[in-house]
Each structure stands twice: as structure tokens, then as C-alpha cells.
């Protein structure tokens, strides 16, 4: 039977093309097996417990109710790094635009006409003097896929870069040049920055990370960039700091009625990851991750389930999502032993409250498989059982 994938937002065709037509149908059913989305607000979009997986083509997953998904047994994936270069390039652009009136000068140049156009432009250009980013200090909060790339690129352009990420992964730490010092505390970083850019996920903990208290520690000439998420920076505090001359400029990808029209605020319409390359990368990664999970039960790049990669070589694979409580493996294997099923291979991993068990076996007749699934589902802590045949 074909599996139904439902998409939300613009998903690149190159990604959708990775779902073979003889196995998958795209956007043809209201009861999909899996969803492929970008920024769709899943807090406000109904998805039932029958949805096996949600793949977010992109980084941020604050648009997905993760607690609900996890308790339903819905695996949520993202596509780490798929759009990081796109964000990096936009940040470099905005760092330059913040103190170089390029856009105003282009608008002005369009209006300069006449026989003496070159004379007029030469005379008028003095109104469009800017400052350079080389030699200035850039603080980077969050040294993950985006932040580490921004730090490297800004360093290559001659900026003095200081990073701050108490939770940096080993992989990203390796990618960072040892020329880039790291601040121990946010309060050590803030007073040093001419520019401060934020690249962290929106979580309860990161909400209002930058508010009046932090803004007061910054230079009044500093420029603050927020291409992470609305809510990480307290907008009311930013507007007050700008109005009181305590901050020079706020540049963000997230518009809101609190900031629209403010003369010291520059807003782009959430285009950090909006390049052809990033959209294709994200859609392809999401499609591959989804197919891997749906076809083999293996999990990579999940934000709510453990990673499991066990080669699918046996004729039958049982996958069980269950609560992370003692003696689950014992109870599961007792049922299999009771039905005289020999286990070829098995793996069990947990993440917070949830656990995932994958069991490979020899051939099992259809009727017995049905019976085993039903028995496994009778264990109260078991949320979902799938039987995959090779
Ligand atoms: N404007 C746009 O279109 C885009 C926005 N984003 C946003 O940027 C965020 C980061 O993206 P990636 O770099 O790809 O994610 P990532 O997961 O690779 O990196 C996030 C980094 O932030 C660090 N971190 C978390 N909390 C922190 C804190 N309080 N202080 C300092 N560091 C902290 C983590 O340790 C991690 O290294 C996403 O979660 C998303 O919200 C990402 C891509 C596009
Ligand atoms: O990847 C992210 O976190 C982004 O913010 C990009 O969002 P988008 O896929 O462009 O709606």
C-alpha cells in the first residue's frame, strides 16, 4: 500500500521527487502517514496520532508541539545545517548594510538624471559615506551550524569575533578556528561588541535572553541582529533602548507590530533560509530522513527521539515506541518468546521520557504478525508498533 505524505509551505520539487511514485502519494490524502513542512505553525494545525513522522525542512522546530508529538509516538526531524550557509550570507550582508547606506544610495542614484549625471553623482556620494566591518568586534551567540559559519566568515573579513555557546557540540567546536575566542559568560561578551548576532533555537529557556538588563551592558553604538526567532529578544526593551540612545540599530528577520516603522529597526521578512540552494538542500534531506524512518525504522536527525541506525537485513523488523520505564525489553521479548519468534538482532535506546526498540526476526506469517502486534500493543506503556517487511 502507498504511503501518504502531506506537505505544508513551499517544499522544493527536488525533495518531493525523492519519493518514488510507486510507493508514495504526495498531498492526495487527509490522513497522511507523514508530514513534510517548513515554518507551518503545527501548534495551530491539527495532526492526529496516526501521523508517524513530521520532517521540518530547516532548523527551528519551535513551530511543532514536541511534547504532544512525542507522547503520540510521532517522530520529529529537522535538517541540521541545510540552510546555514544561506543565513550566514544574509548576516554578512546585513552586517555591512547596517552601517553602509547602500540601499539609500541606490534609491538616490535612480533619481539622478540629466546630462550632468556623473557630476551630480560624484557630488552627492558624500551623503552616503559608511563604516567598514573590518576591525570591529562581532559577538556571536550560538555556535551551531549558522553561528559557527558566521563566525568563520566574519573573521575572514577582518572582524574580531568572540563566540558564546556554553552548550557547543564537539562537531561544531572542531569546525571553529582556534583564532575565535569564546566568552565564558554573556556578561563578558556584551560590553565588547560593536555588532551582536544571535543564532540559537527558541526554547522556554532562551525566551527573552536579550532584554533590558543585557541591552544596558552593550555599547550605545552597537548593532543587534536577531535572525534566530521572535521572542529571544525582548522587542519592547529593544525599542526603549533605541529610543533612549542606548543601542544604535536592531536588525531582524522577524516582523511584528511592536517594531514596524521604527526608524532604527531594519526588518527582513524571514528570508534567512530562503535561497534556492537551501530550499533544495532542506527538502532533499527531509525527504531522505523521512523515507529512512518509514522504510527501515531507522532514526537520524530527530529532535525528540533517539538516533538508531541498524542495517535492515532480516526479513521482518518490528519497531516499538514506548515509554522509558524499566523492564520494557523484558516484557516485549517475553511475548516474542511466547510466540516462538527468534530474535536476529535488537536495539533499544531512550531519550528523556520516550524509548524506541527495534527487533529484527526471520519470516513471520501475516496472521501471526497481526497477533504479535496486537499483543505488544496490550502492554500499557507501548505507544506504537510497526512491522516492516523487507
Ligand atoms: N532566519 C531564518 O530563516 C533561520 C533561522 N534559524 C534559527 O536559527 C537557529 C539556529 O540554527 P542552527 O545554527 O542551524 O542550529 P544549531 O542547532 O546548529 O545551533 C544552535 C546552537 O545554539 C546553542 N545554544 C542554545 N542555547 C544557547 C544559549 N542560551 N546561549 C548560547 N548558545 C546557545 C547550541 O549549543 C547550538 O550550538 C534555529 O533554531 C532557528 O531558530 C535557522 C535557520 C534559518
Ligand atoms: O530553518 C529555520 O529555522 C528557518 O527559520 C527557516 O524557515 P523557513 O523554512 O524559511 O520557513
Image (tube, rainbow, N blue to C red):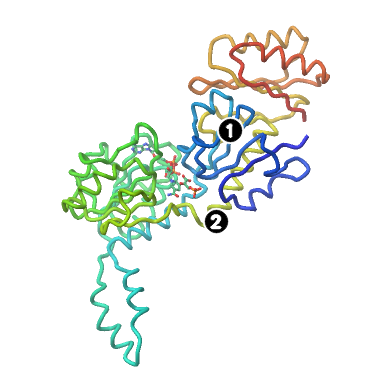
* Quadrant where the image shows the C terminus: top right
Q: How crowded is mark 2: few (under 14 residues within 10 Å), some or many (20 or more)?
A: some
* Residue at position x 42%, y 42% in the image: 144
Q: Where is residue 366 in the image (x, y as percent from the top left)?
A: 82, 20
Which corner quadrant of the image does residue 134 belong to?
A: bottom left
- Say which label, 2 or 1, has the lower sequence index: 1
Which corner quadrant of the image does residue 389 belong to?
A: top right
Nearest the viewer among 373 and 234 is 234
Q: Is residue 33 left or right of residue 176?
A: right
For label 2, the residue is 277
* Quadrant where the image shows the N terminus: top right
Could you tell me how many numbered marks the image carries? 2
* Residue at position x 31%, y 41% in the image: 164
* Residue at position x 55%, y 57% in the image: 276
Q: Residues within 10 Å of mark 1 (few under 14, many from 20)?
A: some
In terms of secondary structure, where does tag 2 sit?
Answer: helix
Farthest residue toward the bottom? 115
For label 1, the residue is 47
Q: Is residue 164 left or right of residue 366?
A: left
Q: Position of residue 382 (x, y in %)?
A: 61, 16
Q: Which quadrant does ligand 1 occupy? A: top left
Amino acid at each position: 500500500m502507498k504511503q501518504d505524505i502531506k506537505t505544508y509551505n513551499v517544499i522544493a520539487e527536488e525533495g518531493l521527487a525523492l519519493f518514488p511514485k510507486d510507493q508514495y502519494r504526495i498531498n492526495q490524502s487527509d490522513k497522511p502517514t507523514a508530514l513534510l513542512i517548513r515554518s507551518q505553525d503545527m501548534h495551530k494545525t491539527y495532526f492526529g496520532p496516526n501521523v508517524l513522522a513530521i520532517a521540518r525542512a530547516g532548523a527551528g522546530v519551535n513551530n511543532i508541539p514536541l511534547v504532544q508529538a512525542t507522547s503520540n509516538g510521532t517522530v520529529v526531524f529537522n535538517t541540521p545545517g541545510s540552510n546555514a550557509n544561506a543565513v550566514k550570507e544574509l548576516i554578512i550582508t546585513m552586517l555591512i548594510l547596517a552601517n553602509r547606506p547602500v540601499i539609500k544610495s541606490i534609491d538616490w542614484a535612480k533619481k539622478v538624471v540629466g546630462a550632468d549625471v556623473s557630476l551630480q553623482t560624484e557630488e552627492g556620494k558624500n551623503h552616503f559615506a559608511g563604516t567598514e566591518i573590518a576591525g570591529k568586534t562581532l559577538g556571536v551567540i550560538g555556535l551551531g551550524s549558522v553561528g559557527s559559519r558566521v563566525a568563520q566568515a566574519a573573521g575572514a573579513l577582518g572582524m574580531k569575533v568572540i563566540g558564546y555557546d556554553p552548550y557547543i557540540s564537539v562537531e561544531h567546536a572542531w569546525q571553529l578556528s582556534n583564532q575565535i575566542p569564546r566568552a565564558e559568560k554573556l556578561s563578558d561578551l556584551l560590553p565588547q561588541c560593536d555588532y551582536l548576532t544571535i543564532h540559537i533555537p527558541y526554547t522556554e529557556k532562551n525566551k527573552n535572553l536579550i532584554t533590558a538588563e543585557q541591552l544596558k551592558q552593550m555599547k550605545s553604538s552597537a548593532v543587534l541582529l536577531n535572525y534566530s526567532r521572535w521572542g529571544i529578544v525582548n522587542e519592547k526593551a529593544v525599542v526603549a533602548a533605541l529610543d533612549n540612545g542606548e543601542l544604535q540599530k536592531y536588525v531582524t528577520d522577524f516582523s511584528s507590530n511592536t517594531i514596524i516603522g521604527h526608524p532604527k529597526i531594519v526588518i527582513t521578512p524571514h528570508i534567512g533560509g530562503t535561497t534556492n540552494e537551501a530550499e533544495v538542500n532542506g527538502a532533499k534531506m527531509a525527504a531522505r530522513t523521512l523515507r529512512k524512518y518509514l522504510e527501515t525504522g531507522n532514526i537520524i536527525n530527530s529532535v525528540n527521539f533517539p538516533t538508531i541506525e541498524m542495517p535492515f537485513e532480516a526479513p521482518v523488523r518490528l519497531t516499538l515506541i514506548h515509554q522509558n520505564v524499566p523492564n520494557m525489553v523484558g516484557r516485549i521479548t517475553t511475548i516474542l518468546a511466547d510466540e516462538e519468534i527468534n530474535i536476529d538482532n535488537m536495539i533499544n535506546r531512550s531519550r528523556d521520557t520516550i524509548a524506541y526498540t527495534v527487533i529484527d526476526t526471520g519470516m513471520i506469517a501475516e496472521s501471526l504478525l497481526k497477533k504479535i502486534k496486537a499483543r505488544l500493543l496490550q502492554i500499557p506503556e507501548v505507544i506504537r508498533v510497526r512491522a516492516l517487511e523487507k
